[in-house]
Image (cartoon, rainbow, N blue to C red):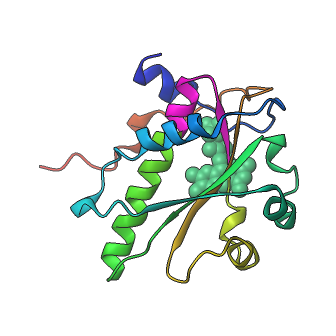
């Protein structure tokens, strides 16, 4: 699968097969993800693997679509607000890389914002000042959601500056 195809065919997966995905494979996708752009090489991303007890406490409404694995991606904050923002941008690039790497190998992920709530942060032990990118169910898709059309990019060109 080439890069354009991976970008265009990735979906937010809501239903997974029960089969396990080896942690080593997930680590491999995370390793690939870490080549994301990041200013001053801060490499701000951190990953938490969520085990069954913690996952049950989170009480996600569909239990992450039955994904066999759940991970959290956070960004470590920053010494100033601009640095924190840049780190969060880099961590979001990391997350997208991870999604594309998994997708390119026949897996998929369910991105949920659940981990950002104060209750979830507490359960997950996310330190103050760290930003949550998302919590991700990871596994082999059981159903691929249909494409959600995007606005033609021509309509997003806000200006053609001199
Ligand atoms: C920051 C962020 C938070 C998201 N949180 C959720 C969420 O809580 N629940 C959910 O179903 N999807 C969530 N998504 C996924 C989007 O809903 C999904 O990407 C969008 O509907 C487009 O679908 P696609 O990814 O399949 O193209 C989130 C995506 C981002 C970038």
Horizontal side, residue 15 vs residue 140: left or right: right
Residue lying furthest top: 1
Q: Horizontal and vertical percent for residue 132? A: 57, 66
- Magenta stretch holds residue 102: yes
Residue farthest to the left, as pictured: 162
Tell me the magenta residue range: 99-111
> Is any part of residue 151 visible from this angle?
no
Residue 99 relative to residue 124: left or right? left
The front one of 102 and 148 is 102
Q: Nearer the viewer, residue 127 or 108?
A: 127
Residue 120 is situated, as x and y percent measured from the top left of the image, at: 73, 72
- In the image, residue 142 above or below residue 86: above
Q: In percent of the image, x 76 and y 33: which residue is there?
A: 20
Residue 82 visible? The answer is yes
Q: Residue at x 34, y 44 (%)?
A: 35
Report which quarter residue 89 is drawn in. bottom left
């Amino acid at each position: 699968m080439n890069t354009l195809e991976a970008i265009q065919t990735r979906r937010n997966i809501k239903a997974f097969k029960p089969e396990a995905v080896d942690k080593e494979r997930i680590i491999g996708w995370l390793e690939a993800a870490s080549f994301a752009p990041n200013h001053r090489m801060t490499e701000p991303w951190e990953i938490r693997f969520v085990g069954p007890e913690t996952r049950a406490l989170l009480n996600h409404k569909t239990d992450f679509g039955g994904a066999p694995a759940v991970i959290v991606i956070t960004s470590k904050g920053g010494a100033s607000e601009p640095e924190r923002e840049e780190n969060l941008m880099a961590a979001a690039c990391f997350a997208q890389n991870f999604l594309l790497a998994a997708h390119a190998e026949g897996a998929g992920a369910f991105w949920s914002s659940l981990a950002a709530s104060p209750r979830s942060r507490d359960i997950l032990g996310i330190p103050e000042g760290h930003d949550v990118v998302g919590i991700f169910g990871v596994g082999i898709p059981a159903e691929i959601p249909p494409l959600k059309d995007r606005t033609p990019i021509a309509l997003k060109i806000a200006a053609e500056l001199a």
